[in-house]
Structures are given as structure tokens and as C-alpha cells.
Amino acid sequence: MTAMITAPHRVKARKNHRCDWCGKTIVQGEQYTDSVYVCDSIYNWRGCDRCAPYVDPMMRWIDDNYGRLSDEVYGPDDLREYMMEVHPSVWSAWIGKEAKHER
């Protein structure tokens, strides 16, 4: 079971990170949301501002379409599925931007 150690809070990146929701690079100096959880080990969960407006609606959409058990957690696969189904043009734009950065 996953337990929260530190509630989500805003921080400024001191180095580059990757958004755990959408995979976007969070660049040094960028503001993002950070939280700390423990499951098998302690880990940070980082969320960028690009996908932040979609996370809560994604959780409701997943619950409405699939239901969740109380001990299940949401992850990047859930966001990807939600974005591809509900906001495909936004998701395509995100993927296009990431592909350009990888060249």
C-alpha cells in the first residue's frame, strides 16, 4: 500500500527532473509540484504545470470508467489513456514537443 509522507507542494527545480505524470522534462528553475510517498521504498512524485490541470479530471474519469479499489494508485499510464481518449489533440501536441526535444 502506498502512503503519503509529504503532501504535494510547490518547489523550484534545482536540477532537471522528469514529470512522473506526462514525462515532460522539468527544467532547472521551473516551478513544479513535488510530494513524497512510500510503498516498497521512499520516492518523490513530481508533476509539471503542463499536465496539472488534467490530473484531477483524469482520476474522476478513470473512476467513472473503471472504478478503483482504495489501495490502487494512479500513474502515467492512466494519464496517457485519459489524454488519448478525452484530449487527443493536446496529447499529440505534447508528444510532438517531446519528440522535437529528443532530436
Image (tube, rainbow, N blue to C red):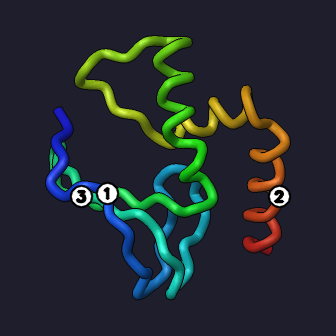
- Taking 75 as reference, is 97 above or below it? below
Residues 63 and 25: in front is 63
Please state the horizontal and vertical placement of residue 11, each as a whole percent of the image. 37, 75
Question: Residue 8's mark?
Answer: 1
- Taking 55 as reference, is 97 above or below it? below
Closer to the chain start, of discs 1 and 3, is: 1
Residue type pointed to by label 1: Pro
Q: Nearer the viewer, mark 2 or mark 3?
A: 3
Q: CA distance from mark 1 to mark 3?
A: 8 Å
On-image quarter of the C terminus: bottom right
Count of marks, rendered view: 3
Q: Secondary structure at mark 2?
A: helix
Residue type pointed to by label 3: Val
Q: Secondary structure at mark 3?
A: strand
Closer to the chain start, of discs 2 and 3, is: 3
Residues 74 and 53: in front is 53
State the residue at coordinates (25%, 20%).
70
Q: Which residue is mark 2?
A: 96
Closer to the chain start, of discs 1 and 2, is: 1
Mark 3 surroundings within 10 Å by alpha-carbon count, few (fewer than 14), some (14 through 19), many (20 or more): some
Q: Secondary structure at mark 1?
A: strand
Please state the horizontal and vertical placement of residue 68, each as a whole percent of the image. 37, 17
- Taking 94 as reference, is 25 above or below it? below
Please state the horizontal and vertical placement of residue 83, each as a whole percent of the image. 68, 36
